Image (cartoon, grey):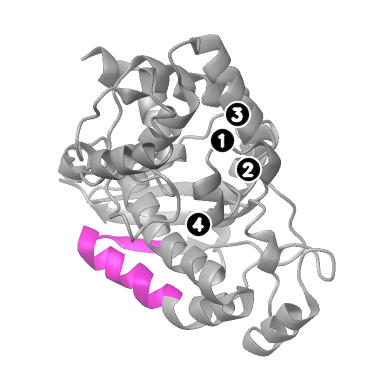
Amino acid sequence: MQANNHPGKKLMETNCYVCHSPTASHDDRIGPPMIAIKKHYIEDETSKEQFIEDIQAWIKNPNEADAKMRGAVRRFGVMPKQAFPEETIEKIADYMFDFDIDQPEWFEDHFNEEKGKHNGNGQGKGMGKGKHQQQAQTNYEDLPYGERGLKYALTTKAVLGKNLMGTIQKKGTLEALEFCNVKAYPLTDSMAVVHNASIKRVSDKPRNQKNKANSEELEYIKTFKTLVASEKEISPIVKETEDDVHVYYPIVTNTMCLQCHGKPETNIKTNVLKTLTLLYPEDKAKGYSENQVRGIWNVSFKKN
C-alpha cells in the first residue's frame, strides 16, 4: 500500500505516538491523538503547504497563545518543546495530509460531540475516517530487529511517560519524583515481561547508579550525541550475537524533562532540588538543556 510505504508513517509512529497514541483510551492518555490534530488543522481551504507550515511553526514554538487545540492545552498543558529535523516534520505532515491515519475507537463519537458544542466548526479534509487501531494489531516479532527493539523501547517509554506526566499534571513535580524513585523500575520490568525482552535505560550521567552505562554503552551514547547535535534523523543501533539482538536508541531531553534534569535554580526549583539530593545523593543527571542526549535505551531479546 502507498500509505504504508510513505516515510512519514514510520516517522510519525516513532516520534509522535508515545504521547499521541491511537490506541490509548479516552481517559488514559497524555495528549490528543494525531487524528485530532489533523482535524483541527485542516479545513476545506487548507492547502498541503499551509498545513506543513502550520505544523512546523507549532513544533518549533509550542505556546498557549498560538494553540489551535485549546481544549487539549487545558487538559494536557502546552506540548513540551522538542527539536526535530525540519525534514522529519515535513514528511510526517505530508503523510497526515494525504492519507487516513489511525484513530482510536472512541474518537468519532468524541469528535462529533465536541463539534456539536461548537456549531460544526472544524469540518474539512481532516474528517476522513481513519483505520481503527491498526497499530494495535502489529506483531512485533515480525518486524526487523531494529524496529522491533524500538517498539519495545517506545511502548515502555509510553507507559512511563503516561504515569509521569499524569502525576506532574495532577500532583506536581515533587510527587513525580516520588513516582520515578519508586515505580519506574517496576513499570519497566513489567514491560520487559510483556515483550519477553530485557529493557534498560542507562546514562553517562546517571541519577540512580543502577543506570550507569558500561564502556560499550558509553560509546553508543557518544555516537547518538553527535547525531542529535547535527540534527539528523535517528535510527536505532543494532548489534547481533549468535543468539541475541541488542538495540540501542537515545533518550533525548525536552522542556518537560528540565524540571528535574535542567540547571539547578534556573530550571529545577529549590524544593525539587532538595528532594533530589535526598533521594539520589550521587545524582549526576542535572544541567541539561533541551534536545540533549541524557542516556540510551538498551533493549535485548532472543533471535526468532
- Quick check: marks 2 and 3 in contact, CB under 8 Å? no
The disc label shown at residue 68, or none: 1
| Sequence-earlier tag: 2 or 4 | 4
Q: Is residue 300 above or below residue 239?
A: below
What is the CA distance from the residue labelled 1 to the residue labelled 4? 14 Å
Residue 189 on the magenta segment: yes
Q: Which is in the foreground here, disc 1 or disc 2?
A: 1
Crowd around label 4: few <14 · some 14–19 · many ≥20 (10 Å): few
| Sequence-earlier tag: 4 or 3 | 4
Instruction: Identify the element where label 1 is drawn.
Output: loop
Crowd around label 2: few <14 · some 14–19 · many ≥20 (10 Å): some
Residue 253 lies, in percent from the top left, at 63, 52
Residue 116 on the magenta segment: no
Residue identified by numbered label 2: 82
Residue identified by numbered label 4: 75
Instruction: Identify the element where label 3 is drawn.
Output: loop
Instruction: Identify the element where label 4 is drawn.
Output: helix
What is the CA distance from the residue labelled 3 to the residue labelled 1? 28 Å
Residue 22 lies, in percent from the top left, at 30, 43
Task: Residue at 46%, 39% (x, y): give it.
Answer: 15
Q: Which is in the foreground here, disc 4 or disc 3?
A: 4
Residue 84 lies, in percent from the top left, at 60, 33
Task: Residue at 44%, 56% (x, y): give it.
Answer: 30
Q: Which quadrant of the figure has residue 32?
A: top left
Crowd around label 1: few <14 · some 14–19 · many ≥20 (10 Å): few
What is the CA distance from the residue labelled 1 to the residue labelled 2? 18 Å
Q: Amino acid at mark 4?
A: Arg
Q: Which quadrant of the figure has residue 126?
A: top left
Can residue 223 be seen by looking at this rendering?
yes
Question: Which quadrant is the C terminus positioned in?
Answer: top left
What is the CA distance from the residue labelled 2 to the residue labelled 4? 20 Å
